[in-house]
Image: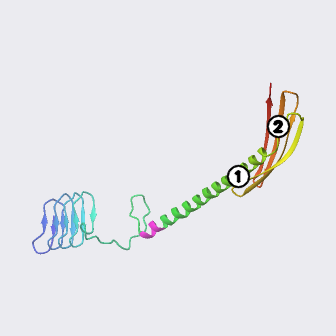
């Protein structure tokens, strides 16, 4: 046990250290440095006037409600090292930049999908606008146009009666995002 000051040192365990005036070290291997500092947790350290280290294996630089800063801390290099504000800010900046980049990529993909979908709807609409062959005719060729949310398309297609019971329809739709192709067949009795 080690102590100094005005005989007001309290140390109740072997290897306790409380060298300042009215410091208190009341556990196994605690250290209390500073006026009215108290270390009551096992292997705890209380640094500075009024500091309270009440939990085991902790270092305290004040007590609840009177927090202090630990300054001039070097960047941590191991998993259990303390992190300084520069390291934290750097990590947050890296995460922010990566997140913004990924969200930007995702937004571009969503926009591209929306453009393709809108153009596809326009092309499908254009295909449906091609007139059908009349029942008393054998062949019809036509064009159709369609628009959806600012995307436009044109389609070319035809319908033919291959027999009195079999009708075939085909068409191709063209838009700024690509083309659509369709073929259909029906059997009538």
Q: Secondary structure at mark 2?
A: strand
Label 2 close to label 1 by CB (< 8 Å): no
Q: Nearer the viewer, mark 2 or mark 1?
A: 2
Q: Which residue is mark 2?
A: 169
**Image quadrant in which you'd find residue 37:** bottom left
In the image shown, does 2 or 59 lie closer to the viewer?
Answer: 59
In this rendering, would 26 be left or right of 188? Answer: left
Quadrant containing the C terminus is: top right
Q: Position of residue 5 (x, y in %)?
A: 14, 74
**Image quadrant in which you'd find residue 15:** bottom left
In this rendering, would 182 be left or right of 87? Answer: right
Mark 2 and mark 1: span between their CA atoms? 24 Å
Q: Residue furthest top?
A: 189
Magenta-colored span: 85-89
- Count of numbered labels shown in the rendering: 2
Q: Badge 1: how crowded within 10 Å, few (<14), some, or many (20+)?
A: some
Q: Residue at x 22, y 57 (%)?
A: 42
- Which is nearer the N-term, disc 2 or disc 1? 1
Q: How is the image coloured?
A: rainbow
Q: Residue at x 13, y 60 (%)?
A: 12
Q: Residue at x 43, y 67 (%)?
A: 75
Q: Position of residue 17 (x, y in %)?
A: 19, 66
Q: Badge 2: how crowded within 10 Å, few (<14), some, or many (20+)?
A: some
Q: Secondary structure at mark 1?
A: helix
Q: Position of residue 100 (x, y in %)?
A: 56, 62
Q: Which residue is mark 1?
A: 116
Q: Residue furthest front?
A: 136
In this rendering, would 74 be left or right of 16? Answer: right
Quadrant containing the N terminus is: bottom left
Q: Residue furthest right?
A: 138
Residue 41 sits above or below residue 123 on the image: below
């Amino acid at each position: 046990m080690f102590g100094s000051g005005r005989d007001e040192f309290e140390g109740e365990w072997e290897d306790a250290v409380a060298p300042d005036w009215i410091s208190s070290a009341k556990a196994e291997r605690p250290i209390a440095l500073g006026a009215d500092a108290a270390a009551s947790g096992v292997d705890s350290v209380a640094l500075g006037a009024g500091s309270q280290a009440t939990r085991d294996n902790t270092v305290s630089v004040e007590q609840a409600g009177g927090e202090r800063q630990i300054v001039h801390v070097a960047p941590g290099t191991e998993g259990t090292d303390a992190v300084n504000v520069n390291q934290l800010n750097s990590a947050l900046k890296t995460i922010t930049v990566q997140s913004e980049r990924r969200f930007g990529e995702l937004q571009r993909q969503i926009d591209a999908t929306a453009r393709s979908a809108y153009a596809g709807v326009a092309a499908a609409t254009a295909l449906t606008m091609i007139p059908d062959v009349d029942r008393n005719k054998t062949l019809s060729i036509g064009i159709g146009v369609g628009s959806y949310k600012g995307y436009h398309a044109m389609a070319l297609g035809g319908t033919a009666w291959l027999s009195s019971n079999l009708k075939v329809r085909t068409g191709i739709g063209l838009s700024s995002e690509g083309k659509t192709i369709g073929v259909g067949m029906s059997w009538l009795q």
